[in-house]
Image: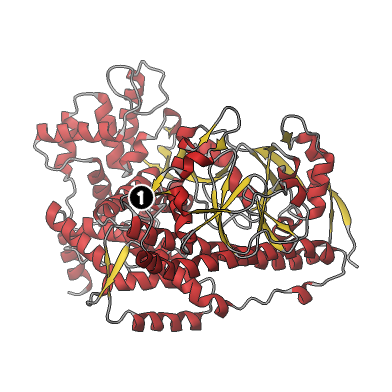
Amino acid sequence: MNKLKNYKLSTLYSMSSGVSTSPDQAGHGYPFLSFSTIFNNPIIPDELDERMDTTFEDRKKCSVKRGDVFLTRTSETLDELAMSSVALRDYPNSTFSGFAKRLRPNSDTFPDPAFMAAYLRGPYFRKVIQSMTTMTTRASFNKDLFGLLELQLVDYQSQVGIGKLFSNIERQINLNRKVNDNLHQMVQEIYLHMFFGCKPNAKLGDLLIEHPKSTVQVNDAKGFEGIVPFFTSGESILRWNEPMTTDSICLLNTGGNADVKFYAGAAAYSTDTWCISATDDLTEYLYMLLQTIRKELDIKFFTGTGLKHLQKPLLKERPVYQPTSKEAARFNRIAIPAMALISENIRQNCELQALRDWLLPMLMNGQATVEATQPNYRLSEHMPVLMLTLIYGIIRCNSLVRRTELYMKDSLISDVLLEMKPLIDGLQLKQLEMTLQKAFASYEVLETSAPQAKHQTDLLDSFISAKRVEGCSERTLDYYRRTIEKMQQSIERDVRRITTEELRTYLASYQSERTVGKVTIDNMRRILSSFFSWLEDEDFILKSPVRRIHKVRTTKRVKETYTDEELETMRDASPNIRDLALIDLLASTGMRVGEVTLLNRSDIDFENRECIVLGKGGKERTVYFDARTKIHLEQYLEHRDDQDPALFVALGGNHNRLGIGGIEKRLRDLGQELGISKLHPHKFRRTLATMAIDKGMPVEQLQCLLGHQRIDTTLQYAMVKQSNVKLAHRKYIG
């Protein structure tokens, strides 16, 4: 028998509240863990479908990380309070609902998150919550309740074993749900394809068969260990001891809001549902019809003050299209087996949930062991259906015709393989790829509409976040974002399905249409390679399409530097002491223009003629300036009558800090006045590097001075004068 130990919930976790949001924030932005997702999932799904436009502070304060427990904060009934959902991994940039509480573990090693996902949904914890909660208008999970709750837990090693078992059960439940979602989508789109826009020829009441009204209320079935699913107006499916129907049925809510459910087989239902089926084997058709008009049901057929009720007589009069027997037969060939399988998966999920709730106390008190209770689900049994639904889910916007063109076919096969990767081993994955290649050998997949990735912006946002963590500057990140967004706008496809040929065509078209150089195209290639490599590393795609696009060969040109005469001409022509000090500082330090703009007066060490600058990637380094620069900087600062801490400020107005654009414009104007071509800040940096190499400065020291991470970059800046090459030849070779 396992030894149980008591723990205060408040010693294991720290509690905090979620994000308060408004309706205009919903539907766009960053991943969001909603009340309904928490309520319906003991373990947070791998992908959060809902989006919320949250701030950086929200995402920092209300983050979702591995081990976090989320509890529903408020409920109209006790049995729905503090329903839990546990994160088994980190969810970058995600936040959670203000209608939930987050419990963040105080330790990284205890308790086990997967175990807590089962424990907090188990009967013991649910009874504790109900017994300790005071019901007023609404039940509430607050600090007082959090401080009082005690948990009886097994040792950590036992937790890990139990957690793995329950994770497997939950994975099977989620797999069944995923199959059901794809099957439902398939049947719905076949329905729309066959019947959307058909002119009404009957009334809804002509199709209906009403089943007897139930006498069993929801509370009667709560906690009941029955043999058949018991459907209510809510999302939870309970159990009942005997079936009320064995047919295919549709279940509509009779109060509150419109909801439609389908089930085929032995089932029971509560008093707050209307159980109906259809004549002539049209129940599956009836269900899809009701699903299609669900919003209309809510608006037109639910009326009343306070709690709205379904107006059945009014609904029966609604005009509908009744299919011919031939149309019904065509539809039912797919719909009936698909909906029967959905029902079977619902039934299996009910059994798995009941097994999960029954097993937990048995495992905790030692009456059962993990090894003896491992569910033996064989993937091969589900493979045909899983393959059908995955393939249909991927190509539901496409049509298959006999021809030969490979890029769409390869994209389709890659998507199927990516979906199956977590479920089968490498050898099976390779066999599946060969099978799909053979099956599609004489087919072409044509897109009838351009499918867009559901969260393409989220993938880009996550990539940018990853690069930000790596230390890229905001300017670089903005360049990355603009380059990738241009590609997405040009290739109007889900980034996870873009092919090598499409990217090659895009880069070639971009170069020809905009007459840009090879260096620009290679920069774009590098950014796209970084993006798609990240998608590959994160398992969003199987292989980066940029792998086969090689580095663009560019013509190496000798980049210009300033001559000594040009530097002196600039100094002599400077109209004010600020510009003179700026030119001297750029020429003697080789700083980047962005580094100059960040300098403050306090950063300058006049005694040692040096200053510390903040370079790329947030790296600090020391640069040095000559005596002439020191004198001109001191004269410039003596003439300043403002209190701004910036080293260089605008001459007029409020003397604001001089920005990159301001420095570039001032030098450009000066160059036009003096007839010096291409006068810009970066040319000073190249001039200093070339001068240092010519005078014998070791390249390693120059690399440190310029702040380069790679010595190759330093060598690109430094141009060796041909005259020095000639002298070296005579000295060393003869």
Which residue sits furthest front?
Answer: 206
> Is residue 374 depicted above or below 109 in this figure?
below
Q: What's under tag 1, amino acid-wise?
A: Leu
- Rendering coords of residue 502 (x, y %): 25, 64
Apparent side of residue 145 relative to residue 165 in the rendered image (left or right): right
Residue hosting label 1: 706
> Is residue 654 depicted above or below 228 in this figure?
above
Q: Residue 14's image quarter?
A: top right
Tell me the residue at 18%/45% (across/down): 562
Q: 10 Å neighbourhood of mark 1: few (<14), some, or many (≥20)?
A: many
Q: Secondary structure at mark 1?
A: helix
- Rendering coords of residue 503 (x, y %): 26, 63
Tell me the residue at 46%/73% (across/down): 387
> Is residue 359 depicted above or below 664 in this figure?
below
On the question of residue 79 being in view, the answer is yes
| Residue nearest the observer in this picture, 139 or 472 | 139
On the question of residue 494 being in view, the answer is no
Tell me the residue at 45%/72% (across/down): 388
Q: Is the N terminus in the top left, top right, bottom left or bottom right quadrant? A: bottom right
- Rendering coords of residue 27 (x, y %): 45, 42
| Residue nearest the observer in this picture, 734 or 33 | 33
| Residue nearest the observer in this picture, 324 or 72 | 324
Colouring mode (rainbow / by chain / secondary structure / one colour):
secondary structure
Q: Is the C terminus in the top left, top right, bottom left or bottom right quadrant? A: bottom left
> Is residue 690 depicted above or below 599 in this figure?
below
- Rendering coords of residue 363 (x, y %): 82, 66
| Residue nearest the observer in this picture, 608 or 581 | 581
